[in-house]
Image (cartoon, rainbow, N blue to C red):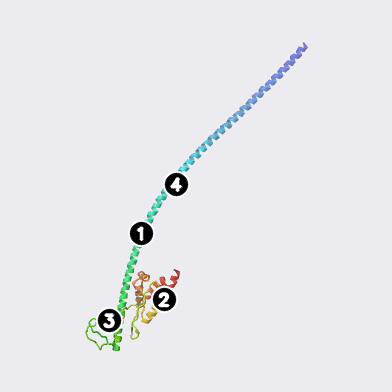
């Protein structure tokens, strides 16, 4: 009896221990499941966050793609605008340049015509001056020859009408003025008047300066003209006329830029010729 009671108490204690162990096991399982639920919720939350990140990344990629397309479109439009604007600008500049070039050509043509007209007028004036000086030279030569011949008593012979007599004129008589003169005593006028000396009885009557162009320095010609003017006794105005009448070539064209009063003044003409034809200016060129 006692043994059965002992065994029964032992069984009761074993059952209590088993129940307690089972209870502890269940509690552990519940706690584990709770922890698993927490972990699962964390995993779900992280998965949701990853999905959101992927969506945001996809949205960013899409926006970048759209921005790239917009940038390419903007670059294409900019290139097209640049090409079209460049063409219009080139056309405008070309047209404007053509108009300005046409205007400059017309202006240059007008100025050239004016200069040519002035040069032609100057040439005509110089021609008139040369003819006038030649006539004066002929008159001076004839008068000096007649006075010289009258003082020395040299006879002129004229046997036919129209022969050259005193002062280069034609005789009106068909008979001899005096006795026939020797051939050596007959004075014949030189064939040319300009640029040579007239000698009657050893006296120089008239001498004109040589022509002046761009072939010599102005200082050389100026010295020549000064000596000639001193020997001939020319005043300033006569000296200026002789200088103007001797110009040719490029030197003659300078007169087109001078007034009439300047052309008749030796100082003004000399200064205008010194600038382009002087030794200093030629050395600079």
Farthest residue, direction right:
2
| Circles 1, 4 touching at the beta carbon (< 8 Å) | no
**Crowding at mark 1 (Cα within 10 Å: few <14, some 14-19, many 20+):** few
The mark nearer the N terminus, 3 or 4, is: 4
Judged from the image, the secondary structure of the residue bearing numbered disc 2 is helix
Label placed on residue 168? 3
Q: Which residue is mark 2?
A: 220
Judged from the image, the secondary structure of the residue bearing numbered disc 4 is helix
Q: Which residue is mark 1?
A: 103
| Circles 4, 2 touching at the beta carbon (< 8 Å) | no
Q: Which residue is mark 4?
A: 79
The mark nearer the N terminus, 1 or 4, is: 4
The mark nearer the N terminus, 2 or 1, is: 1
Q: Which residue is painted at 41% across and 74% down in the image?
A: 218
Q: Nearer the viewer, residue 57 or 106?
A: 106
- Report x, y in % for residue 113: 33, 65
Give the left or right position of residue 84, taking residue 4 as reference: left
Q: Nearer the viewer, residue 80 or 62?
A: 80
Q: Nearer the viewer, residue 16 or 178?
A: 178
| Circles 1, 3 touching at the beta carbon (< 8 Å) | no
The mark nearer the N terminus, 2 or 3, is: 3
Q: CA distance from mark 1 to mark 4?
A: 35 Å
Q: Which residue is painted at 42% across and 48% down in the image?
A: 83
**Crowding at mark 4 (Cα within 10 Å: few <14, some 14-19, many 20+):** few
**Crowding at mark 2 (Cα within 10 Å: few <14, some 14-19, many 20+):** few
Q: CA distance from mark 2 to mark 3?
A: 36 Å
Give the left or right position of residue 140, taking residue 227 as reference: left
Judged from the image, the secondary structure of the residue bearing numbered disc 1 is helix
Q: Nearer the viewer, residue 192 or 279?
A: 192
The mark nearer the N terminus, 4 or 2, is: 4
Farthest residue, direction top:
1
Nearer to us: label 1 or label 3 = 3
């Amino acid at each position: 009896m006692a043994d059965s009671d002992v065994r029964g108490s032992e069984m009761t204690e074993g059952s209590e221990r088993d129940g307690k162990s089972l209870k502890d096991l269940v509690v552990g399982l519940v706690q584990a499941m709770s922890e698993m639920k927490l972990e699962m919720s964390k995993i779900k939350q992280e998965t949701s966050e990853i999905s959101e990140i992927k969506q945001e990344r996809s949205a960013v990629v899409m926006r970048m793609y759209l921005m790239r397309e917009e940038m390419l479109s903007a670059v294409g439009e900019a290139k097209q605008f640049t090409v079209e604007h460049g063409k219009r600008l080139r056309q405008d500049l070309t047209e404007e340049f053509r108009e300005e070039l046409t205007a400059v050509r017309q202006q240059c043509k007008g100025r050239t015509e004016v200069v040519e007209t002035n040069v032609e007028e100057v040439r005509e004036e110089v021609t008139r001056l040369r003819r006038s000086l030649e006539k004066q030279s002929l008159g001076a030569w004839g008068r000096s020859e007649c006075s010289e011949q009258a003082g020395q008593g040299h006879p002129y012979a004229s046997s036919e009408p129209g022969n050259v007599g005193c002062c280069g004129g034609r005789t009106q008589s068909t008979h001899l003025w005096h006795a026939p003169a020797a051939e050596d005593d007959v004075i014949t006028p030189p064939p040319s008047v300009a640029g040579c000396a007239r000698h009657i009885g050893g006296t120089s009557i008239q001498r004109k300066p040589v022509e002046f162009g761009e072939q010599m320095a102005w200082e050389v010609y100026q010295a020549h003209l000064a000596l000639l003017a001193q020997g001939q006794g020319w005043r300033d105005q006569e000296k200026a006329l002789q200088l103007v009448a001797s110009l040719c070539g490029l030197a003659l064209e300078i007169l087109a830029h001078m007034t009439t009063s300047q052309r008749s003044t030796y100082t003004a003409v000399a200064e205008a010729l010194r600038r382009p034809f002087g030794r200093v200016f030629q050395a600079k060129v």
